[in-house]
Amino acid sequence: MTDKPVYILAIESSCDDTSAAVLKNAKVLSNVVANQKVHAEYGGVVPELASRAHQQHIVPVVHQALKQANIGKNELSAIAFTRGPGLLGSLLVGTSFAKSMAQALQIPLIAVNHMQAHVLAHFIEDTSQQMPDFPFLCLTISGGHTQIVKVKDYFDMEILGQTLDDAVGEAYDKSAKIMGLSYPGGPLIDKLAQEGDPKAFQFPKPKVKGLDFSFSGLKTAILYFINDQKEKDPDFVEKNKANIAASIQHTIVSILMEKLVLAVKQTGINLVAIAGGVSANSEMRKSLQKAQKQKNWHTFIPKFEYTTDNAAMIGIVGYHKYLKAKFDSKDTIATARLHVEET
Ligand code: KG4
Ligand code: ZN
């Protein structure tokens, strides 16, 4: 490698956030995210509305990212984009945009696995953040995934355990919907929980062997509990929302922490990272910090802006692929399903 800096333009459009970022080597120069408000009233992401919104946002978002980074498109070394997993219609918008821009500029195209990007967000250079050494464990918790990954190298990852049904973000969002909150409900439950008693209500924890997870039973238990209580008092949720939120949050976080403890025990690896949208959760962060002190773990908690979907994390993968000259052809296709173990 020469000392010439590498400038990557990264594009993320896998779900309901349109994002573009510019990285100079491993540093983020800009990271612009346009959220899609259209889904709030539907209680979840509506795929058709998502791809339409991506089409509206992509040009201004890329323009803004280049402007904030203060670089011209002719200075770019390569374009990285999310190939999958995600909603196909959404992925296609970012994929086609990236392909045509790379072709017009005659620069390499780099396809990125969104799940690897959540994990590798820990390698974004930032003075306030420490980077993990290999191997480390990463609990990736998002709206679509819940998995404990053994990260042996940048592109060598192994799933040790994962959800058998709903993802943890879905458990948050569906519980919020049952409580009458809007989408995405995770941050709303987190906020309400600050004022509540985590032991006010008890919800059953799933009995799943090994390092796998299950969240669908919890959602059903919450639904039955709230329906029963509403029969006795129609204002039950309104009167108890902080306590309900705190109890749900406490149950979810203890399920996640119990499995992490087991993963550390089984692997003997005490470098533990969290990633994905749910890693923004305040109780999850606190519990990990507590484990750092009490269990002598080395923990890695991403900055808020790199937890939920963003293009900076796509850019850091793009940078490491660029260093290894792992480029993709314009025939690369977007794919709704992609394993974290596949590059
Ligand atoms: O990683 P992400 O942006 O998208 C996916 O790849 O799925 O994760 C989105 C998920 C949503 O389910 C959202 O409710 C959840 O992350 N989330 C949170 C918090 N912030 C976002 N869940 C709990 N507490 C939060 N503070
Ligand atoms: Zn994600």
Image (spheres, rainbow, N blue to C red):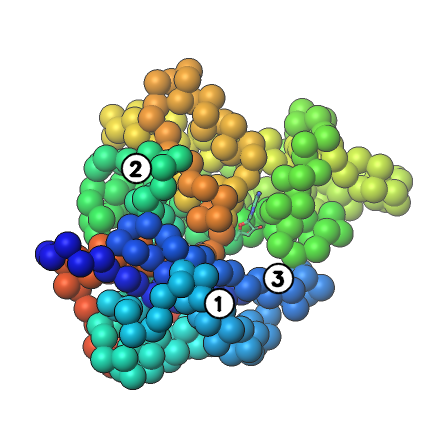
Q: Which of marks 1 and 3 is nearer the N terminus?
A: 3
Q: Provide residue 17's location: percent of width, then percent of height.
A: 52, 63
Q: Provide residue 34's location: percent of width, then percent of height.
A: 55, 64
Up/down of 15 relative to 279, above or below: below
Instruction: Looking at the picture, tell me which residue is in the foreground, 208 or 169.
Output: 169
The residue at which mark 2 appears reads as: 131
- Inspect this view and state whether residue 273 appears: no
Instruction: Looking at the picture, tell me which residue is in the foreground, 114 or 227.
Output: 114
- Residue at (36%, 37%) from the top-left corner? 127
Q: Which amino acid does label 2 sit on?
A: Met
The answer to whether residue 205 is left or right of residue 75 is right
Q: How far apart are marks 1 and 3 (CA)?
A: 27 Å
The answer to whether residue 183 is left or right of residue 319 is right
Question: Would you identify the image quadrant in which residue 147 lies?
Answer: top left
Up/down of 34 relative to 331, above or below: above
Q: Provide residue 20's location: percent of width, then percent of height.
A: 43, 64
Instruction: Looking at the picture, tell me which residue is in the foreground, 265 or 18.
Output: 18
Q: Which amino acid does label 3 sit on?
A: Gly
- Residue density around tag 2, few if under 14, some if 14–19, many if 20 or more, within 10 Å: some
The answer to whether residue 247 is left or right of residue 146 is right
Front label number (2 vs 3): 2
Q: Which of marks 2 and 1 is nearer the N terminus?
A: 1
Q: Provide residue 279's location: percent of width, then percent of height.
A: 48, 41
- Residue at (40%, 22%) from the top-left corner? 292
Kind of element beneath mark 3: loop
The residue at which mark 3 appears reads as: 44
- Residue at (60%, 47%) from the top-left corner? 186
The residue at which mark 1 appears reads as: 64
Kind of element beneath mark 2: loop
